[in-house]
Amino acid sequence: MLIAATVAMLVVMALTIIRGFLGPTFYDRILAVNMFGTKTVLLISLLGFVMGRPEFLDIAIVYALINFISVIGVLRFSNSPVFKHDIQEKDSGENSS
Amino acid sequence: MMDMVIGIGSALCLLLGSFLCLSGGIGIIRFPDFYTRMHAAGVSDTLAASMILIGLMLQNPEMIVMMKLVMILLMTLFISPTASHAIAKAAMNSGLQPLLVQAETKTGDKSSHL
Amino acid sequence: MRYTISLSLGLVVFWLLNSGYYTPLILSLGAVSIVVVVYIVHRMNVVDHESQPLDLSGKILVYYVWLIKEIILANISVVKKIWLGKGSISPTLATITASQKTDMGKVIYANSITLTPGTVTISIDADRLIVHALISENIQSLKAGEMDRRVSKLEKLC
């Protein structure tokens, strides 16, 4: 059962990565990265139990915190024009080409 | 006997958690725009994570491992709404308009005066 | 002072639960790091009622039980919508009025809305919350105001 859950988690991570690559806007990508991080925490905990080494849980805790801080850190710069003009630039680019 | 009941409970929790996670993954691919995808991510952050962590808690009798799992669960539940609120607010501030179902005057007004 | 003591106690429990090694060396290292953390937190000036709502801690449990029930119900409905596909969802944006007086109450209310899948608080402006919902019925049930009432009750208790 543990191994099945681990495989399911890997599948979900693959789906999130697909959304991260496809994502039309920046925010889709950030959302995908955030969800990928949450799933990584679960994957690390599950792998710890599969291998019989529950010490992995420490790494999971640290990963959860780093994931949160990195998402907030990226969003800290969401006032910058790069984020804002993404949609319009893409639209005008499509129109001109 | 007791061990068997706990084992079955743990397997059920893990199975349910995996199913909910998969649903979240499907949702994030399938939904049409950013704001709706956020709800799909919410499913896999709340109940799915809790189910998997509870399943793991039922696997192991050791005290310290149990406490660490509880800590991860609490952290997930405190962090996920904050992160999704931050992403949603940043998206709204940068002018990403949500896809709304009905172009009624009521909702149209509200989204335009934001 | 009260908040400093409770913060230190919390850190001690956190260290003991996470470490698992109870030798004198490790314990003294833990004591040193707790002192450093308390000092830094004092310099940041965040040791007050807002960071540690102690009065709330006992009474909030009843609310948590209700919230967990609500989260499970919301999860089931959102998962159903995910498998039914695009046709079944009706994304809605609406403004909800919060009846809480204090900032703490508003934050609890907004976070509870975000924590239940299917509804996300996008911004808080005075007492108006802008909420995005996956299904328009979610907005109806928020406007009916059961969660609002429960959070207000919680706020009065503290």
Image (spheres, grey):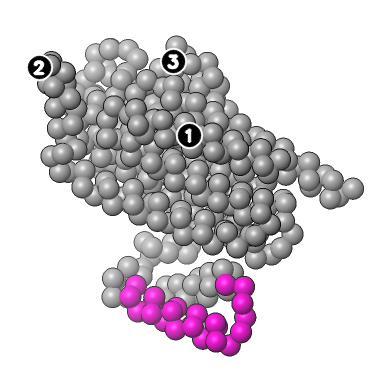
* Residue A73 % position (x, y): 28, 52
Q: Are marks 3 and 2 on the same chain?
A: no
Q: Which residue is mark 3?
A: C86
Of residue A58 and residue C13, the one placed in the foreground of this image is A58
Q: Are marks 1 and 3 on the same chain?
A: no
Which residue type does callout 1 highlight? Ala
Q: How would you classify the magenta stretch by its main secondary structure?
A: helix
Q: Which residues are magenta?
A: C19-41
Task: Identify the disc placed on residue A96.
Answer: 2
Of residue A22 and residue B83, the one placed in the foreground of this image is A22
The vertical placement of C103 against B33, above or below, is below
Which chain contains the residue that carries disc 2? A
Q: Dot 2 lies on which element?
A: helix
Do the residues bearing badges 1 and 3 touch, measured as CB atoms within 8 Å?
A: no
Which residue type does callout 2 highlight? Ser
Circle nearer the viewer, 1 or 3: 1
The residue drawn where x is 57% and y is 58% is: A57
The residue drawn where x is 50% and y is 22% is: C82
Q: Which residue is mark 1?
A: A14
Sooner in the amino-acid sequence: mark 1 or mark 2: 1
* Residue B2 % position (x, y): 86, 50
* Residue B24 % position (x, y): 50, 31
